[in-house]
Structures are given as structure tokens and as C-alpha cells.
Amino acid sequence: MAKSNGILKIEGTLENLTFYKKDGESYVRRKGGVSKERIENDPNYLRTRENNSEFATAAGAGKMLRMALGSLIFKAKDSKMTSRLVKTMSDVKRYDTTSARGQRQVYNGLGTPDGKMMLNGFDFNINAPLSTVLFAIYDLDTATGVVTIPNLVPQEQIRYPEGATHVSFQSAVLAIDFETETSELVLSTIENVPINLTPTSVTLTPPSVPTTTGVTLFLLGVSFFQEFNGVQYSLKNEDYSVLQVVEVV
């Protein structure tokens, strides 16, 4: 692989050279390697086919989770969230101890305590893990999905971006079955409080708890706003917007 320093930036394939961009830089590499047909049929590439199959399984599970959460993810994600989620799903899949190599499934991995732990605590925005933004104790009731943050002092217990005047909290309960590819998402109301020194108890209550089979994910989101002339404007700051899986059951 070589780095391209020329004035003309090309993307694509030209003769036996492939031009592409990575992290804003232009690179060029020579075409080559093993053909797709050989990988799919040669017995020597059995392990490769098994790895490719399981990677596709993990990628599919990651995509399903992203689609199930919908617009929640757009409020708090980083540029490498998709690849990080695929890696996490691959880690979950390793706890499938019943399937043959190349056929391990995410849903089997999530059927184990260790598999659930791999997904528990996943931050969709690695730039703003929940533990670096919220410095208050919160409680989750997995039977009802209610999240409570008692006696929160926003100005002292929240790391907030410059210019922020208000902080919003929202919880979510997602029941998702990676085997049947079904899901149900329930959101709490949004609790918006001013960033000041007044103690405030935050209670996030979903209207119901989903009953879809599979596993249930409980999530907590934090976002920030700036009030101007009585109107609150969203502060889209990647270093502060939070969405975390706080529990998997």
C-alpha cells in the first residue's frame, strides 16, 4: 500500500491499481490476491469461508440493532460506531457454544450471561461514554423500565458543552430477537431540566414494556440544548451526546 501525494486524486480502479481514501488520505494499492471463486470453493480456504460467514452474521446483527433503534442513534453516534458494533456482536457470538464453527449465532451468544455482558455498557458515541458525562447515581427497574436519577444537581453532576443551558434525558426499552428478526421499541417521555445548582429528581417512565421474544435492552440517552429568547436549540456536539445500553436481560 502506498500513499498518493499527487495533485490529481483518483478513486476506483485503473488497470491493475486501486485508488481509495481512508481517514481523509488518498492511497493506492496493486490489485491482486486470491479470487472470489477460489475462496468460495477451494478446500484450503474453509477457515476463511467460516470466518466470512460469521463476520456476515455479526454485521447483520449490528445492522438489525441500528435499524431497531432508529432515530435514537442519530442523536448520539461516532464515525466508527458501525464497526465497533460489529466487533461487539462478534464478541457476543463467541459465546455460542452449541453451533459448529462458521455457524455461530449472535442470538445464541446472547442466551448466555457472558454474551449479554459483551453488549451491556455499549456506548453508541465513544466520544461521550455515559460515565464521562453523568456523574450521578441512577436506578433502573427492569420490570417496568423506569429510570430514576434522584436529587440530580445538573451543574455539578453533568459534564456539559459550552453554551448549554438545559439537559435532556430519555430512556428506551428495546425487545429484539436476532433469530426471528423482530423487535419492539418503547421510549420514555423526555425530561428537560435547566443546568443549574437546583437539585432535581429525574424520572423516565416508558408507557409499557415490550413483550417481543429474544433479549431486552435498556438504554439511556443524554443531550444538550441552548435556550435563546425562550426557544431551546439542540447542541449537536459529538463530545457530549450520550446513548448507552445500560442493561441487557
Image (spheres, rainbow, N blue to C red):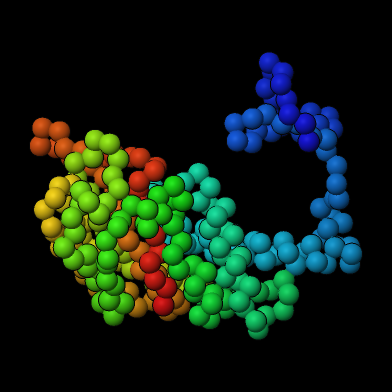
Query: How many numbered marks have been drawn onto this rendered protein structure?
Result: 0
105 or 156, nearer to the observer: 156
Residue 13, quarter of picture: top right
Quarter that holds the C terminus:
bottom left
Left or right? Give the position of 126 relative to 25: left
Left or right? Give the position of 45 relative to 68: right
53 or 199, nearer to the observer: 199
Residue 70, quarter of picture: bottom left
Residue 4's spot in the image, x, y percent?
Answer: 73, 25
Considering every residue shown, the one lying at the far bottom of the view is 98
Residue 127's spot in the image, x, y percent?
Answer: 44, 47
Considering every residue shown, the one lying at the far front of the view is 156
195 or 180, nearer to the observer: 195
Residue 157 sits above or below residue 111 on the image: above
Residue 122's spot in the image, x, y percent?
Answer: 46, 61
Left or right? Give the position of 111 relative to 236: right
Image point 18% across, 47% down: which residue? 195
Is residue 67 shown to the viewer in this render? no
Residue 92 sits above or below residue 153 on the image: below
Residue 52, quarter of picture: bottom right
Image point 11% across, 53% down: which residue? 198
Considering every residue shown, the one lying at the far top of the view is 7
72 or 161, nearer to the observer: 161
Is residue 224 shown to the viewer in this render? yes
Image point 31% across, 77% down: which residue? 142
Residue 75's spot in the image, x, y percent?
Answer: 35, 48
Left or right? Give the position of 60 relative to 248: right
Image point 33% across, 52% down: which residue? 133
Residue 202 sits above or below residue 21 on the image: below
Quarter that holds the N terminus:
top right
